[in-house]
């Protein structure tokens, strides 16, 4: 676009800025409005014998030994540091350093203990 076209377009926009278009009046409302569809009757409840009842899930496995210590390292140091910050308790630098090292060590241990390969390379995770 040339600058004169730009200026003309800009001038036209500015001249008509704030104008409200005139819309034609809407036609009168019809006397006969459509009736709403009737809702279907609610279905009878399914008897308990026919409904699906999933089996109780197995109990969660409890970590033991080093894995338990690593999980405590993931959970406990952030909580302890947060509580000390909220309560404005100044921890000695040695304790703070040990808490951070415990957290990092627990994280690295858990990552290292993860399975290196999948059991089934073609498995997408879905179970029926």
Image: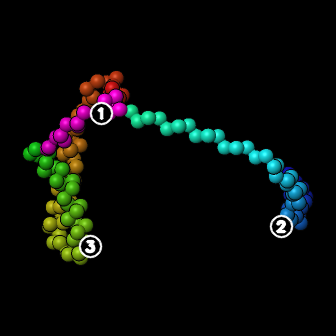
Residue 127: percent from left, percent from top:
32, 28
Q: Residue at x 35, y 32 (%)?
A: 47
> For the magenta stretch, what is the residue range?
47-63
Residue 48: percent from left, percent from top:
32, 33
Picture quarter containing residue 92?
Answer: bottom left
Q: Are marks 1 and 3 in contact (CB under 8 Å)?
A: no
Q: Is residue 7 above or below residue 71?
A: below
| Label 2 element class | loop
Q: Residue at x 47, y 35 (%)?
A: 43
Residue 67 on the magenta span = no
Q: To which residue does mark 2 refer?
A: 18
| Label 1 element class | loop
- The secondary structure making up most of the magenta span is loop
Residue 48 on the magenta span = yes
Q: Residue at x 39, y 33 (%)?
A: 46
Q: Residue at x 16, y 49 (%)?
A: 70
Q: Quadrant of the C terminus?
A: top left
Picture quarter containing residue 94?
Answer: bottom left
The answer to whether one can see residue 3 in this image is no
Q: Is residue 31 above or below residue 118?
A: below
Q: Closer to the camera, 38 or 112?
A: 38
Q: Closer to the camera, 103 or 56?
A: 56
Q: Is residue 43 above or below residue 70?
A: above
Q: To which residue does mark 1 refer?
A: 53
Whether residue 47 sits left or right of residue 100 in the image: it is right
Task: Determine which of the numbered discs, if any, sits on residue 86 in the image.
Answer: 3
Disc 1 to disc 2, C-alpha distance = 65 Å
Mark 1 or mark 2, whichever is nearer to me: 1
Disc 3 to disc 2, C-alpha distance = 55 Å
């Amino acid at each position: 676009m040339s600058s004169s076209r730009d200026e003309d377009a800009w001038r036209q926009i500015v001249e008509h800025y704030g104008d409200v278009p005139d819309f034609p009046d809407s036609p009168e409302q019809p006397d006969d409005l459509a009736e709403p569809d009737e809702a279907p009757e609610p279905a009878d409840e399914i008897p308990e014998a026919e409904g699906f009842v999933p089996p109780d899930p197995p109990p969660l496995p409890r970590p033991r030994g080093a894995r338990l210590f690593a999980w405590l390292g993931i959970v406990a140091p952030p909580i302890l540091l947060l509580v000390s910050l909220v309560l404005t308790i100044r921890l000695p630098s040695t304790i703070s350093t040990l808490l951070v090292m415990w957290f990092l060590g627990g994280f690295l241990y858990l990552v290292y203990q993860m399975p290196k390969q999948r059991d089934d390379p073609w498995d997408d995770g879905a179970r029926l």
